Amino acid sequence: MLTGALRPTDVRFVSIIIMCCLLLGTAANAAVPKKKKSPVKGVSTASSGKVPTLASSSKGSAVVRDWGPYLDVAQQLTYWERSEIAEWRENREKELAETLAAYITVWNKKLSDPAAGVVTVRGEDQQPVYQEKDYLRLAIAQTVDYLQNDDRDSLEGAAQTLEKLKDKTAMPEIAYWTGFVKALQAMENNDSRQFVVQVYAVWNNAIMYLEQGALAGKEGDAGKMKSAPFHYRNLVNLVVNRAIIDQKLADLNALGPLFLMLRQRDLEEKETEGKYLTTLVERINEGFVAPDSDRYRLSFTVAAIEAKRLQQIAAAKLDAEGMTEEARKYFEDARSFNDYALKWAESRRSSGAVNAVIDYLDTTSFAIERLKGNESAPSYNFFVMLPTHDGQSTLLKSMAVYNDVATYTEGGWKRAGYADRESYLQATHRLWRAIMELSLWTGDFYMMQLVDTAEPQKIYTLVPPMQVVLNSYLDFLSSQRKRNLPDVIPDFAYFGAAEASEKLAYGYMKTYSYSTDVTAYNLWFLHRMQSTELFPLNPREMMLTASVLKRDGRYNLFLDYYLPLAERFRKSDAVRIWLEEGTLDDSSVAIREYRDSIAEIVVVAPEETATVAPVKKQPVYFSTFKKLREELQRKPDHPVHRLLKDFYLEEIQQATNYTALLHDSNRLNNGF
């Protein structure tokens, strides 16, 4: 039976449409830009379908005739998307009949050589006087050009222009743009330390002064009093979208307190506009204290949020469109940010690291599950590599992470970021399930192809990789059991092992016909027996195994191994205790009836098992166990998982013919 479907949960899509405030003019005239924010990084959105627009002036105001008034309030657009800035710029250039590039060229020349060509009416040279506003406007224009097209020359030009105002950085507006530009330079240079310094410089030397002035009621310029929310938005966008998501700038955790402070500020985004940046700040703060996060690590938290967003989009596209090139892009991007989250976690033992690994494995399982039926899809050749690569190397790396994390069961889980031991155990069990699901879905990928082929070459191509991944899971369970850390092994791990063994048995049976010895046959019987030991509530498979052994003249194996199993199940203390402590439901009724009649099932004549008794003659528990198996695949907390675990451990701790078989399958050649 194939593994139950794995579905991503907690899919959250936050609608985002941001409308900026009116651009406030200078004392002479006012220029008023308006825009609706389009979908941006950090939170998934639904687009409004409208392009950003900009009104030229307020009613009754004179028409704006130069770039100055727009640049004076450019902080109201510098957090926009690059494409939105480009559209705004194009519209302004048409309106003003002057390109921003021309404005930059003209003022660059004026301010770099202010005395050139200036003559008084008497024919004497005279030094023209330019205001600080002229320098600041040029620097802002150069910054806008950089933000639109990532031209580092424009950024360097802005820095050089602002250098001429270095003695005026006590003024909040100049301090803001100076720190903002230096932060962008640090980002481009991958200088995390300097980036953090400059972001805090913007906060301490500009934003806090604006806030203090507003609180004291001493701010003379009403426009500046209203600019703080836009400065907040610019900082959020600068740190999250530009530095962490776009530039992958690491070691920005020192900026975590900034987002704690931003949570207390009003970014003045309206509900009808989507409140994108406000929502983003809120989600980051929630991530700081989430039970599956790395506490207050900003870089990790942003990477984890972005990875989850991209996973949700990739999953939706894989379900709706199949394996298209666009679905592949989102899938790869999601895995990339999972990698960054793991890289930026405190350690690979931390709660955040474990969560990143789980997301990575679940996303991969989700894609592998959908390989069948997408063979003709554009990106199938990419996704079909996942079982080979992730079904082996990624699983082994994840098992290594689990090995490290499991040691915390004896203490120290608080150091890894877990709030309590219960949270720690939940995380380890989730990681185990992700490892188990990827193992089984990878095994299913190969098994479904084995079912449909009788070509020897193809069989020998499919069976080895299937054996590797499924045996790795069985070995993983065995190794963890030997470490004597029982709490970190979830109950459902044993049912997963039963499914892995069953698939392995099928693979060995497919190869046996093309073998010159009985090694493959012995391994088929070993895994068939192992599957039954791990999931004894499968009388149909037990009867079919008897039929195969009878056909092959090896019915003695059934008598030697399955009869003792039936007797153990009938007398098992684990079964008795579970039935006494459990609730009276369909499962417990069926298990009790099965226990009391298992001897009759096992000793039935092999000839009668060839077709497995007609349905009308089968006990009711045959159909009950079929439904139970489907429930066990879907529900990791099903109470029967505990029964299966206890029964298997009861057996594996003894010296029996089954435990001897686990150590040497060739003992079947010699009998007892």
Image (spheres, rainbow, N blue to C red):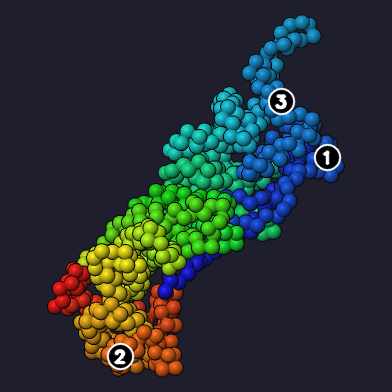
Disc 2 element: loop
The answer to which of marks 1 and 3 sits earlier in the sequence is: 1
Which residue is identified by label 2?
604
The answer to which of marks 1 and 2 sits earlier in the sequence is: 1
The residue shown at (70%, 55%) is 48
Residue 574, percent from left and from top: 26, 84
As drawn, is 187 to the left or to the right of 604? right
The answer to which of marks 2 and 3 sits earlier in the sequence is: 3
Residue 153, percent from left and from top: 58, 27
Disc 3 element: helix
Q: Is residue 294 above or below residue 423?
A: above
Gap in angstroms between the C-alphas marked 1 and 3? 26 Å
Disc 1 element: loop
Residue 343, percent from left and from top: 39, 48
As drawn, is 104 to the left or to the right of 66? left
Q: Nearer the viewer, mark 1 or mark 3?
A: 3
* Label placed on residue 188: none
Camera-side residue: 598 or 8? 598
Which residue is identified by label 3?
102
Gap in angstroms between the C-alphas marked 2 and 3? 94 Å
Q: Nearer the viewer, mark 1 or mark 2?
A: 2
Amino acid carrying mark 1 in the image: Ser
